[in-house]
Amino acid sequence: MTKAKDHVTFTNTILIIGVNPHVIPPPSALEVLFQIAGRNKGPIPVRIVVDGHPFQQTLVRYAGDWRLYLNGPMLKATKKKVGDRVRIEMSYEPDRQPVLMPEELKRALTKNKAAFMEFQKLAPSLRLEIVRYIARLKNPGTVTRNTQRAIDFLLGKGRFVGRDKHK
């Protein structure tokens, strides 16, 4: 691992959990990034360069490990696959605000354990898509309607965000 004033560089193997390819940054890289970011909790917006290709991504903690998910376009651009070693330059991106889960969606998921369990099983990108969709709505009635549609979708009862029933 190397570090500069505003970024860290490391090489690691692409792993997979479920259907989600990711890299686990080494503790030394995380330590430097946390120091640059001034925080070590919550999703951390980062700018990464994967084998010379720049991307925006979010460093997230899942099942006890900090993970940097590599989506399909990233893998395609870098011609990498699970099991390959990849060189990553990572820097904190403070101007990009994380999307917070709307309170109404949070309450609905808390009330409906089955929907919550299904939400947790979704790919991080689909969870973010649902949260982002509802978070961008302005009218309270629209938020309520779409929150219910999201719960129904998670329970396999309908379409949401342009997708057929979940399950």
Image (cartoon, grey):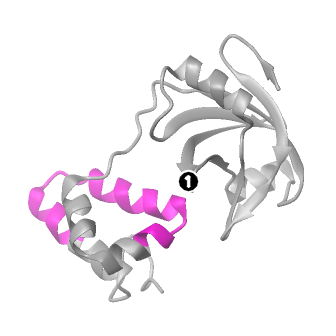
Residue 166's image quarter? bottom left
For the N terminus, the image quarter is top right
Q: Position of residue 46 (x, y in %)?
A: 58, 33
Residue 57's image quarter? top right
Q: Position of residue 50 (x, y in %)?
A: 78, 39
Residue at the (79%, 50%) spot, across then down: 77
Lateral position of residue 78 relative to residue 154, left or right: right
Residue 90's image quarter? top right
Q: Is residue 139 magenta?
A: yes
Q: Which residues are magenta?
A: 119-147
Residue at the (70%, 33%) spot, across then down: 27
Q: Position of residue 80 (x, y in %)?
A: 86, 54
Task: State the residue position of label 1.
Answer: 62
Q: Amino acid at mark 1?
A: Tyr
- Against 16, is 62 above or below? above
Q: Residue furthest front?
A: 64
- Against 37, is 78 above or below? below
The prevailing secondary structure element of the residues shown in magenta is: helix
User: Can residue 162 be spotted in the picture?
Assistant: no
Q: Is residue 85 magenta?
A: no
Residue at the (34%, 80%) spot, across then down: 114
